[in-house]
Amino acid sequence: MKKGRALGLIGLVLLVLVGLMGLKAPASYEEPPLGDLGRAIYDRESRLLFRSEPRYRVYRLRKEAPRLVAEGLDKKEAQRFFKTPGFSLERYWHSQYLAGEAFKDLLRAFQGRNFYPSLRLSLSWEVQEGLYRWLGRWREAFSELGAAVIEIPSGEVFALSHWPPERPSSLQHLLFPIPSGSKEFDVHFFGQATGLELKEELGSYWPGGPSWATPLQMARALAVKLCKVPVKFTLFSQDRALTGSCSRGEGPYQYLFQKKWVEFRLWPKEQPRFIFILAGELKANPPSISDWALVERSLLRYLPQPRGREAFPGFPDLRGLTLKAALEELRGRDLKIRFQGFGTVVRQHPSPGTPWKKIKECVLYLKDET
């Protein structure tokens, strides 16, 4: 009888010890499934915008609550704990937004998508940063707003931003009435998806009657009408040779319906290749928007002719750019470059337009103005 009780007590002790060691701890190390090795998102120049990789937390199992002893370990660092009694591992995804706030809300829309091992977007790092900062100038006039820069021949979105971040973009959900006799738009494209890989309202097309369209649908119909390009918008880089541009660049085109306001601009004026869109819900009267220079500067390098720095007679105007974007503008120049502070360029030496032959050194003064 006593022997049976002793064996029962030993069994109970062993059961408790197994529980304390943790059933989560695997008996041996196993390679994660191929799809779990990590994900990355790149911009159109193959610069890393976002990275998500598996990481591990290590817990020491005790009679009381488990104690966290390490976290942030990669696969190789965590491997030695898989066979160690008394430890339990928890795997989680560690996400890094390497491009900062200008991209964060947009990139979150792609995190839940099943892609492996990487995704290359049509977005340009410099153009997205420029649009994000430029959009910040108009927040006082709007309760919500969104903006985009789209290349007309390809339909590729170079930049897309909206505010406030917790709401859907105005470009995709605000609806405007379009008269049936409108001369600016090819109305046959209303009521259809623009091709953008994000959720959008479709609006409606009624032959002989009024149609309803979002700013994105209006932009597409305007590009088709003026540029004769039946393009679909996309956030993915196409990597294909492009030909053609609009033959004219009238505008800006502005529309106001109740408190909803939208503006379109074609750029450059001579041979437009891009369409700029700004739309939102107004707080007061429509603002007078005439200066897109911050966005235009970041687009110069993507024009067929002239290219990048050849558009400047001398040293470029780098004010408003991040340090990374400013260094990109100066890449290939035989210059000694110094900088002070952090944030965006607020002052520079030499001044814009200084002939290159007179420049051997430049200094960039940066300040965080967010």
Image: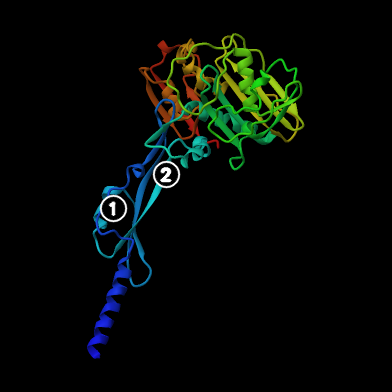
Work out which residue is located at the far left of the displayed protein and give it: 3
Q: Looking at the image, which residue is at 56% across and 24% down? A: 149
Q: Is residue 218 visible?
A: yes
Residue 95's disc is: 2
Q: State the CA–CA distance, disc 2 to disc 1.
A: 18 Å
Across and down, in percent, residue 115 comes to 41, 37
Residue 303's disc is: none
Across and down, in percent, residue 281 comes to 70, 34
Across and down, in percent, residue 277 comes to 62, 25
Pick whichever of labels 2 and 1 is earlier in the sequence. 1
Number of numbered labels in the structure image: 2
Task: Tell whether label 1 touches label 2 (CB within 8 Å).
Answer: no
Residue 78's disc is: 1
Q: Judging from the image, what secondary structure is the residue with disc 1 in?
A: helix
Q: Is residue 320 visible?
A: no
Picture layout, residue 100 above or below residue 299:
below
Front residue of 201 and 226? 201
**Residue 355 picture quarter:** top left
**Amino acid under disc 2:** Ser
Front residue of 145 and 187? 187
Quadrant of image for the N terminus: bottom left
Task: Give the colour scheme of this rendering.
Answer: rainbow
Picture layout, residue 309 above or below residue 258:
above
